[in-house]
Image (cartoon, grey):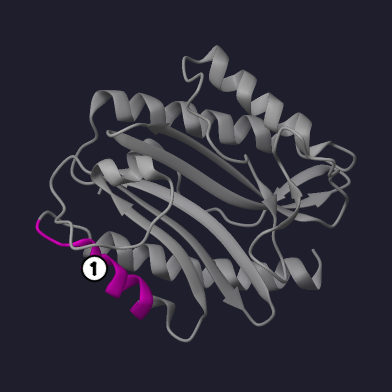
Amino acid sequence: MTQKSETVQRALHAAETVYNALQRAAKPGATERDLEAAVRAAAGGHEVQFDLLTGPRTAEIEGGATERVLAAGDPLLLDLCLKQDDCWCDVCRTYFLVHPAAEAAQAYETVLACVRHIAGLLCPGEEAASLYRAAEAFFRNNGLQGKLRHHTGHGIGHTPFEAPVEVADSQDVLHEGDIVTVEIGAYYDGSFGIRLEDDYLITAQGAAPLWEYPMSLQSAVI
């Protein structure tokens, strides 16, 4: 571990408090504004940036809270950047209120499997573009071709978004000591979106996860 990664871990500990508060606040009849208030209260004095989307709005990838009222079956997406001292973490979880639709549950499992696949490829010397292409291939081989609509990960540290950036034309290469995200999303226009993101330290042995917060489909149903 490095001083930087230890600071990011402290940020992730604070992020865990935020996600716990979000789950407590999420219930049928609550609004996105209610969830936003819970997020900000749980963040305390930490600086935060986040996307908060529910229902069909999760297909829009980015956006802030509205007056939309939650209903059973809704997906709920919180992509959270939180600053601790001079470092940022960046994580995302997608939840389902009461129960997920069958198509959304299957998409969730595929996105989760892709996160694990890409995390297993992280190592010093790996090209960021190769990681993106690996995620594209995973989606194509699992029935989600065309659903991958942004980068598949990026560096974090003194800013919430920095090199190496995993896109098709990236020239970036991973180095030992980098802290990177694996950020996989699948988006169904006008219906729903699924995004999952975790943070990793690049070591000589591969990727060391910095956060062990639950990500299974079972844990995503609230």
Label 1 element class: helix
Residue in view at x 32 percent, y 53 percent? 53
The image position of residue 20, as x and y in percent, is: 35, 64
Residue 172 visible in the snapshot: yes
- The stretch in magenta equals 29-41
Does 199 sit left or right of 65 as displayed?
A: right
Work out which quarter of the rendered image holds the N terminus and state it: bottom right
Does 33 sit left or right of 81 as displayed?
A: left
Does 179 sit left or right of 20 as displayed?
A: right
Residue in view at x 27 percent, y 66 percent? 35
Q: Quadrant of residue 187?
A: top left
**Residue under label 1:** 33
Residue 213 visible in the snapshot: no
Q: Is residue 70 above or below residue 113?
A: below
Amino acid type at circle 1 is: Arg
Number of numbered discs:
1
The image position of residue 124, as x and y in percent, is: 88, 43
